[in-house]
Amino acid sequence: MIAATGIDLRLGAVDVLSGAQLCTRSGQVVGLIGPNGSGKSSLLRCLYGMLSPNRGVVLIDDEAIGSMSQRSIARSVSVVTQDASADGIDISVGEFVLLGRHVHRGDHQGFTDDDRKAALDGLELVDMSGFVERSLNHLSGGERQRVMIARCIAQQSPVILLDEPTNHLDVRYQHEVLTLVRRLKIDTIVVLHDLNLASRYCDHLVLLDDGKVVHQGRPDDVLRSDVLEPVYGIEVRLLADGQHSHLAFGPLAP
Amino acid sequence: MSLLEATDRAPTTSSAGWAGSRRPTLIALTLITIVSVVVAIGLGPIGVSPPTVLRIIAHHMFGLFEAENWARTDDAIIWEVRLPRVLLGAIVGSALGVVGVTLQAIVRNPLAEPYILGVSSGASTGAAAAILFGIGSGLGAESVSLMAFFGALGALALVLALARSTGRITPSRMLVAGVAVSYLLSAVTSLLILFAHSAEGARAVMFWLLGSLANADWSTLPIGYLGMGVGMVLVFWWRRRLDLLALGDETAMASGVDPGRTRLLLVIVVALCVGFAVSLSGGIGFVGLAAPHIARRIIGPIHRHLIPASAALGALMLVWADVAARMALQPRELPIGVVTGVVGAPVLVALVRKLNHSN
């Protein structure tokens, strides 16, 4: 379990986070939402040590992250990052997923058959087992995101963090990736821009604005026009088609 | 089968046949390197056949064979001159290949090579000061090499101080610091040459700057092998960290690798390797750039294969470049940097063309 409380973060001259708090919920998907620049990705990066807050505490299983080695952190938390690209290295899908096992092996140890099996299981779980030898650079956006998730599965950490995993994906893959995330039934925190996706796939939502948590709760409690309109500065209407409800957005009346 | 159906199914996979072994390729590269070393030892103005080379080496190392079976001049040439020279070429070439592959991963730039850290410029400044002005002459017979090594260490300290001045080391900071220190120390070396009173000294510095294995001897070889060998073993130890750094800092961090700390450790290790290499053989360009690229094409991008392959190819390139340097215009000897430059420049052009094409 990860719990962050009272997080202040200053990057350069900008206060990015001010007293932000966030925690995982057992077996649930927590969605981190908010406008551009509200501090969603920065808060997520504080949870695995990529950024160090100026104030506040991040606890992983009641241990302060600052006193943990990066390897210990990675054993507890796996991350689908925004920079996850293979531009610098023409690596195969299988080797990439296998690198998720690094946290379980010393630098001097080679990967074992168990590691390869864990990597293959991860790929099979995301329906990519036929892509083991393919170059990561030659995958579509949706395939690549599934491989990123396979790597987290191979890492076998109890918590997964995803930083905007649906970016650049078409609607079909957006739904497939998030459905997959739900099926994993692992403690998950996901940064999302699309509020309709957040409504549908998250159990709990945390709304950030200007570095502060301004609202949190079940999607129905957060995705309301009186909550969202002051934060996004746009008109929000809830539409229902019988099975699902959808948010529609438009400019606020002058 | 859709993705959603797949998640409902129990994984039943086997690791058999997964990611084919590169061992045969590595063994072949190692054998080619060993054969090349033996053949190269026999090549020169006075040729000695590979069997005789092996017998002379076995005689000196294990007391095998009778020395009467070959000429005494052959014995002296092989044991005293060519063997240390070719062995130095092999270790320096290996080190440059490994350093190149390491730097290309940690700065995520395919054009990175051993001299971007400014370390070779520091070594050159130290060597020029020793050759032209006798600075450090109290260090003994190897004062030029030692001054070059101290110059390399000084340059490394300067680069690290500049690269860390605004926080942790990032690839771009390191590159800028390395280039800045390189320019600064190259200017200092040029000034030293300009103020030198002896034309012969300036010529000696130029020859040294372009690299040569001619000064190899048994006294310095063990130090070079130890220094560069330990460096290469450490780089191989951290091979998976290199894979992860090449994928980006966030991915490395998410996989349990602290990128700033790992980069600092690796930079110190490879800079020391370059310091040893440059102090023993001068500035030899292109091997550290070309060997990793060729190795990557042969064996793929994973560093557990790429590091030994780059080492073998670096050794091969430098051993054969040295053969060309001592035989092309005999009895005159070419600086080895001229040979690697003439061969390496087309490789670099081809590389740039390939990068443009892929972009």
Image: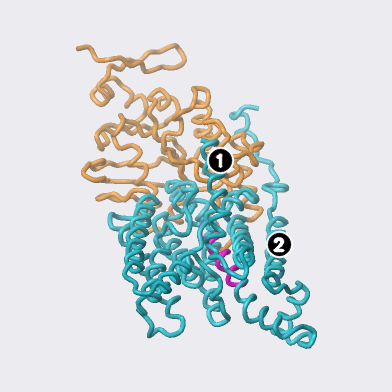
Chain colours: A orange, B cyan
Task: Find disc 2 in the rendering and name its residue.
Answer: B32
Which quarter of the rendering shows the N terminus of chain B?
top right
The one nearer the camera, B37 or B107, is: B37
Q: Is residue B99 magenta?
A: yes
Residues under numbered marks 1 and 2 in contact, where contact means CB atoms less than 8 Å apart: no
What residue is drawn where x is 75% and y is 72%? B50
Residue lying at 32% horizontally and 15% vertically, measured from the top left: A237
Of residues B319 and B251, which is closer to you in this image?
B319
Picture coordinates of residue B15, whole percent (x, y): 69, 48
Range drawn in magenta:
B87-100
Q: Mark 1 vs mark 2: tell me if same chain.
A: yes
Label 1 crowd bin: few (<14), some (14–19), many (20+), radius 10 Å: few
Does residue B315 appear in this view?
no
Could you tell me the amino acid type at mark 1?
Lys
Mark 2: amino acid:
Ile
Q: Which residue is mark 1?
A: B354
Query: What's the chain of the residue with tag 1?
Result: B
Q: Is residue B222 shown above or below A214?
A: below
Q: Earlier in the sequence, mark 1 or mark 2?
A: 2
Vertical placement of B344 versus A134: above or below? below
For residue B187, which quarter of the picture?
Answer: bottom left
Q: Position of residue B324 (x, y in %)?
A: 63, 63
Please report the residue visible at 37 percent of the width from the left and 46 percent of the height from the top: A47
Residue at x 62% of width, y 78% of height = B81
Callout 1 secondary element:
helix
Measured from the top left, where is residue B284 in percent x and y?
Answer: 51, 62
